[in-house]
Image (cartoon, grey):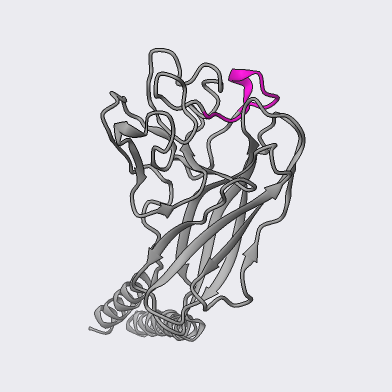
Amino acid sequence: MKSSFLKFFCLILALLLVEDASANLVQDGTFTSVSYSGSLPLSAPYYGQIGPDSGTSAASGATLTVANWSTGGYNFVFNASNVDRGTQASGAQAGQPEQAPGQYNAADGYGNTFMWGSHNGGASTWTAPPSGGNFIAADGAFEQGAITQTITGLTVGKTYVLKFYYGAAQQESFDGATTDQWTVSMGTGNVAGNFKTPVVNLAAHSFSGWSQATMYFYANSTTETLSFFAAGTPNGEPPFSLLAGVTLEVVPDCSSWLIFAGFGSLCIFLEMMRRRRRQAEIALAA
């Protein structure tokens, strides 16, 4: 009877621990839910400048959207397999019109913005972010605009940990070293104001690779706006900041974990006492 009680008690403890486990509150943090609308015949997977086409084929009504994310800047969605697959002169990769029209498109109406990489004469070979999926490339010196998402389900007074991968690249057809950085905020409840990633100093025609950032935010409301704003230098050498693998989870309440640890220790102690008593009973019976 006592053994069954202890097993039940420990099961309840395990369920409480699972219930306290954090869930990612960011929707599509790998930027893979990309959709296209417009009259140009594009084929998936889509990539290119996010938002409506404002270039030479604006009449097509082309719009590229990343679900749950908003931006008004010169910002793009790519993945490691297409980010350097063309040049400004060639436009979309031959035979694969996947890149949506943007502000500056090729004469045929398809996109023509790529980053430097080994496939178009750049100095670096691209690698996928550790999180997998797509990533954002945001110009930090030209028509800057934040990439934002409305986060819901927050608990006022709780602290949340934000993690993401960042890097830097340079737009193909441009030259010169650049600097790249993200400014990150969530509502008005940050622990220490707007956070900034370390400055990435990038050589010409390069890709920096990926680093992970960890930041903490305090919720003042059940709904907050998570914002990433790219800043870089110099203007005219397109410094592009990269963003991937965004997660936001609540920091577990330490007091709850201490209670759980105490319950766990009690379970172990009671089970040890039960076994010792049982062994003593067996010894007396012998």
Using the rendered view, name the quadrant where residue 240 is placed.
Answer: top right
The answer to whether residue 263 is visible is: yes
Q: From the top left corner, tell me how far across and down residue 252 is, in percent.
A: 47, 76
Identified at 45% across, 86% down, the residue is 259
User: Residue farthest to the top?
Assistant: 95
Identified at 50% across, 25% down, the residue is 112
Q: From the top left corner, tell me how far across and down residue 236 is, in percent.
A: 69, 38
Q: From the top left corner, tell me how far across and down residue 123 is, in percent.
A: 70, 24
Quadrant assignment for the C terminus = bottom left
Asked if residue 136 lies in the magenta stretch, the reply is: no
Above or below for 223 versus 140: below
Identified at 55% across, 18% down, the residue is 89
**Main secondary structure found in the magenta portion:** loop
Above or below for 182 versus 158: above
Q: Which residues are magenta?
A: 113-125
Above or below for 58 versus 258: above
Using the rendered view, name the quadrant where residue 284 is placed.
Answer: bottom left
Looking at this view, is 162 or 257 the one in front? 162
Above or below for 142 versus 266: above
Looking at this view, is 247 or 111 the one in front? 111
Quadrant assignment for the N terminus = bottom left
Q: Is residue 199 left or right of residue 167?
A: right
